[in-house]
């Protein structure tokens, strides 16, 4: 079965540190890729998405992600985190040829210390 | 306002009872999804539907049922066969072609089985 794996369950950083959250998926066909963020007490929001073209995509709030097809990865990065980035981050994969199946990873909780 | 409405927000039920969670959207989206969110497990896909009168099982469909008789509605029934039904349930819809659209989420329904 297809799956999405996020490497880190909980990441703790100090402000201004760089961030990289790993995401790998297991499916050999065509996919669209997403990162969502859930701030405490709020809905999930879209951070960024990849459909095709340049594998380096930029999203809101200074986040970016790189799609590496050969590694089935879509890692999220930010050069310098802020306290307000404290949230839970979810990687998601839309699978073509599966009737619109969209699956999420387990989530990574990010805590940024001021 | 356009959006997704889930009801009820909180629900208590006794073991052995079926319960139906409502999800309505006025975004004119074709695709709708039901997820279950548990701490440390991310969002797990229960059922999804790309068009009216059609739906598919997700990764954890056992003990759940759905219907999609109208484009705007996608109710989820948690049956007595679901072994661990206490959870937070999220409904989402997606517009766009072939997986290009982002998900819009409802506020969720928290089900507690007593």
Image (spheres, coloured by chain):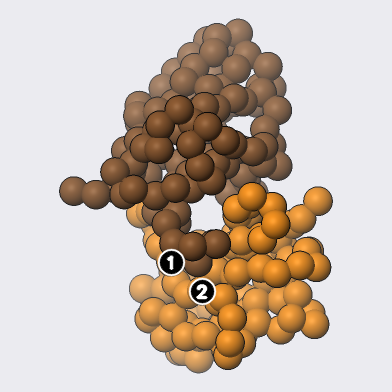
Q: Which chain is the one coloured brown?
A: B
Q: Tell me if label 1 and label 2 are in contact, CB under 8 Å.
A: yes
Q: Report the label total.
A: 2
Of A41 and B59, the residue lying toward us: B59
Residue drawn at the location 66% of the way across and 23% of the way down:
B63
**Could you tell me which chain the residue with mark 1 belongs to?**
A
Q: Colour of chain A?
A: orange
Q: Is residue B87 visible?
A: yes
Residue under the point 50% across and 91% down = A79
Q: Residue at x 42, y 86 (%)?
A: A62
Whole-percent x, y for residue B29 in the image? 39, 49
Residue B96 position within the rendered picture, expressed as x and y whole percent measured from the top left:
44, 62
Q: Residues within 10 Å of mark 1 (few under 14, many from 20)?
A: some
Residue B91 higher or lower than A35, as above or below: above
| Numbered badge on residue A108 | none
**Vertical order, A37 against A64 (above or below):** above
The residue sitting at 55% across, 76% down in the picture is A50
- In this view, A25 is above or below B71: below
Residue A49 circle label: 2
Q: Which residue has dot 1 on it? A: A46
Q: Chain of mark 2?
A: A
x then y, percent, for residue B23: 39, 34
- In the rendered structure, the answer to whether residue B103 lies left or right of residue A20 reads left
Quarter of the image where one finds residue A12:
bottom right
């Amino acid at each position: 079965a297809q799956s999405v794996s996020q490497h880190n369950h909980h990441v703790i950083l100090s402000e201004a540190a760089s961030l990289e959250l790993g995401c790998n998926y297991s499916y050999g066909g065509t996919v669209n890729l997403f990162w969502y963020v859930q701030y405490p007490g709020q809905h999930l929001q879209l951070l960024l998405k990849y459909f095709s073209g340049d594998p380096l995509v930029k999203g809101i709030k200074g986040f970016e992600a790189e799609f590496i097809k050969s590694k089935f990865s879509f890692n999220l990065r930010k050069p310098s985190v802020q306290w307000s980035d404290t949230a839970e981050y979810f990687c998601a994969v839309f699978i073509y040829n599966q009737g619109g199946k969209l699956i999420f990873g387990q989530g990574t909780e990010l805590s940024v210390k001021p | 306002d356009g959006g997704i409405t889930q009801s009820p927000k909180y629900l208590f039920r006794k073991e052995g009872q079926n319960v139906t969670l409502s999800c309505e959207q006025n975004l004119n989206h074709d695709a709708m999804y039901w997820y279950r969110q548990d701490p440390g497990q991310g969002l797990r896909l229960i059922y999804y539907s790309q068009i009216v009168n059609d739906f598919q099982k997700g990764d954890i469909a056992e003990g759940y049922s759905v219907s999609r008789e109208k484009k705007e509605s996608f109710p989820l029934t948690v049956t007595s066969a679901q072994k661990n039904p206490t959870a937070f349930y999220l409904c989402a819809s997606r517009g766009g072609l072939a997986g290009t659209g982002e998900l819009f989420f409802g506020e969720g329904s928290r089900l507690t089985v007593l």
